[in-house]
Every structure is written in C-alpha cells, then in structure tokens.
C-alpha cells in the first residue's frame, strides 16, 4: 500500500516537472490524474459528466474505483477534459516509439 501511494506521488511530481508527460501504469494512477486535471480546471464531477452524457455518480465511481469502469466511460471522460490517450512501448520516449513505426500516411487517422 505504501509503495503504491509513493509511486503515485512520484508520478504526479514527475508530471508537474516534465511538461505534461506522465507514465501511467495502472487504473488508480489514471483516475487520480484525471481527477486532478478536472479539479485544476475547476470543473465539478457533474459538469464533466454533462459534457459527455454521463451522470455525476459515474464520474465519481471512475475517480474512486477505476477498475470497475467501462472503457467507453474512460474515453468519454478524456473527451470531456479535452485529453487524448497515447500508448507506447515501455522505456521509449513518444518520439522514439513513433520513429520505429509505419510512415505517417499509414497511421490510423480516426478520431474517438
């Protein structure tokens, strides 16, 4: 428990000093990040929910018990906060991950 809390604090510290770059490796860290972002923007859970058709209780449930929430809910919350999700191989920077992949014209261009 202590290790998990320490890791979350260190991840949040890293985020604050690495220009919006944060490694999120578990559901709880993600929920804390999104909760903090919502609060930073001075938005209530109800306001965020209303932006994307979710109840306030659903937003609350995600923030407190993220392992029990559907992926659709995650993507709606990301949309409400004007955020996007990027996935990359462990240990690589985002730039390195994209330089190893297909040319830009071959990448997926669909929006969620």
Image: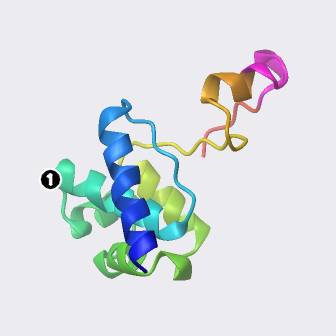
Residue neighbourhood size for the residue with mark 1, other residues' Cα within 10 Å, grouped as few (<14), some (14–19), many (≥20): few
Q: Is-magenta flag for residue 76?
A: no
Q: Nearer the viewer, residue 12 or 107?
A: 12
Where does the N terminus fall, quadrant-wise?
Answer: bottom left
Q: Residue at x 33, y 66 (%)?
A: 49
Quadrant housing residue 53? bottom left
* Residue 81: image location, x then y, percent: 35, 49
Provide the residue span drawn in magenta: 99-107
* Residue 104: image location, x then y, percent: 76, 17
* Residue 12: image location, x then y, percent: 34, 51
The answer to whether 55 appears left or right of 66 in the picture is left
The number of numbered discs placed on residues in the rendered structure image is: 1
Q: Is-magenta flag for residue 100?
A: yes
Q: Residue at x 62, y 29 (%)?
A: 94
Farthest front residue in view? 3
Quadrant housing residue 29? bottom left
Residue 50 seen in the figure: yes
20 over 54 or under it: above or below: above
For disc 1, the marked residue is 42
69 over 40 or under it: above or below: below
108 over 83 or under it: above or below: above
Q: Residue at x 43, y 43 (%)?
A: 83
* Residue 44: image location, x then y, percent: 19, 64
Say what secondary structure mark 1 lies in.
loop
The answer to whether 75 appears left or right of 96 in the picture is left
Residue 80 seen in the figure: no
């Amino acid at each position: 428990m202590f290790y998990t809390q320490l890791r979350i604090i260190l991840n949040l510290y890293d985020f604050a000093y690495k220009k919006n770059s944060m490694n999120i490796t578990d559901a709880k860290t993600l929920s804390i990040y999104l909760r903090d972002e919502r609060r930073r923007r001075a938005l209530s859970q109800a306001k965020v929910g209303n932006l994307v058709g979710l109840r306030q209780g659903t937003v609350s449930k995600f923030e407190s018990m993220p392992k029990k929430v559907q992926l659709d809910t995650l993507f709606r919350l990301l949309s409400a906060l004007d955020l996007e999700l990027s996935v990359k191989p462990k240990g690589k920077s985002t730039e390195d991950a994209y330089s190893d992949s297909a040319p830009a014209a071959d990448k997926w261009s669909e929006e969620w």
